[in-house]
Image (tube, rainbow, N blue to C red):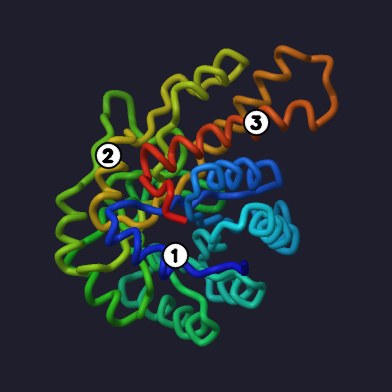
Amino acid sequence: MPLVTSTEMFRKAYDGGYAIGAFNVNNMEIVQGITEAAAEVRAPLILQVSAGARKYAKHVYLMKLVEAAIEDTGLPICLHLDHGESFEICKSCIDGGFTSVMIDGSKHSFADNIELTRKVVDYAHERGVVVEGELGRLAGIEDDVNVSDEDSSYTRPEDVQEFVEKTGVDSLAIAIGTSHGAFKYKPGQKPQLRFDILEEVEKRLPNFPIVLHGASSVIPKYVEIIDNNGGNLADAIGIPEDMLRQAAKMAVCKINIDTDLRLAMTAGVREHLTAHPEHFDPRQYLAPGRDYIRELVKAKLINVLGCDGKA
């Protein structure tokens, strides 16, 4: 089975009231943990790559890992560029075999965002690739994405229809209170998603797939393991999983998960090396990290996304 686009995935997800998991990948163990979990519960997948991951692992290595995952599992997998900030990086990924790209023009003016996004859409659609755009800016840090609380902004529902019509994007990432990274809120703040914005966007864009970035829940189990082994994450707060499940029952068809994967991998590695400081074989300490990723992803696919059995 070749790589697929997200078009059919999103159509089924919207009609079925569930979401597709979009998991960031950086190396073999992360790819294996995600895809083994999805194969076990027969869930469709979006594997996504950031600019930082391409720099770290190289485009060609990531492509071959994803191709191997498809051959190993037989799952429908879409390969997506996460937070492409320029036409050039989107073009490189399209030409290099990705089936989906995100052009993040949210730091630009509304007019410039439309112009940049339209340029990517025209190039991508001519080659059978789908495009995700973004309106609104999420706070937080993830790879090359770094937005302060002061510079963040909710999506304006009154802008979404014009943006989609003028750009031709296939899906739209919106800002309703999620945030990149593990430290999502200041002391005393509580997570709260703006479902009123999501509802208004859904009215203005009926049957159109919406995307949530920064949607890791910062699982307490992995935070505790990391802290018990020299970490400092006690104050980290994520998005409650029941809120994400509610969003998945609405217009949200794609939910991005990266930080939770990093925490799961780190927890497995730290726990193992603390218990076995004499080990120096990477296979010995990377395997527990992979196991925790598999455990995490399986739980997300079933309990949060609701896409188990949909492949």
Read off the residue under disc 3: 289
Tell me which residue sits at (48%, 50%) in the image. 43
> Which badge, 2 or 3, is on the more N-terminal residue?
2
Mark seen at residue 62: none
Q: Is residue 80 visible?
A: no
Residue 251 occupies quadrant = bottom left
**Residue 78 location (% of width, % of height):** 53, 63
Element type at mark 2: helix
Read off the residue under disc 2: 243
- Counting other residues with Cα less than 10 Å from the Cα at mark 1, is it few (<14), some (14-19), or many (20 or more)? many
Q: What is the C-alpha distance between the residues marked 3 and 1?
A: 31 Å
Foreground residue, 310 or 81? Answer: 310
| Nearer mark to the viewer, of 2 and 1 | 2
Element type at mark 1: loop
Q: Is residue 214 visible?
A: yes
Query: Would you place residue 18 above or below residue 98 in this image?
Result: above
Read off the residue under disc 1: 104
| Amino acid identity at mark 3 | Gly
Q: What is the C-alpha distance between the residues marked 2 and 3?
A: 27 Å
Element type at mark 3: helix
Foreground residue, 288 or 303? Answer: 303
Q: Is residue 39 left or right of residue 59?
A: left
Tell me which residue sits at (52%, 81%) in the image. 128
Tell me which residue sits at (27%, 39%) in the image. 243
| Nearer mark to the viewer, of 3 and 1 | 3
State yes or no: discs 2 and 3 in contact (Cβ < 8 Å). Answer: no
Q: Is residue 133 left or right of residue 75?
A: left
Q: Is residue 304 left or right of residue 40?
A: left
Foreground residue, 116 or 132? Answer: 132
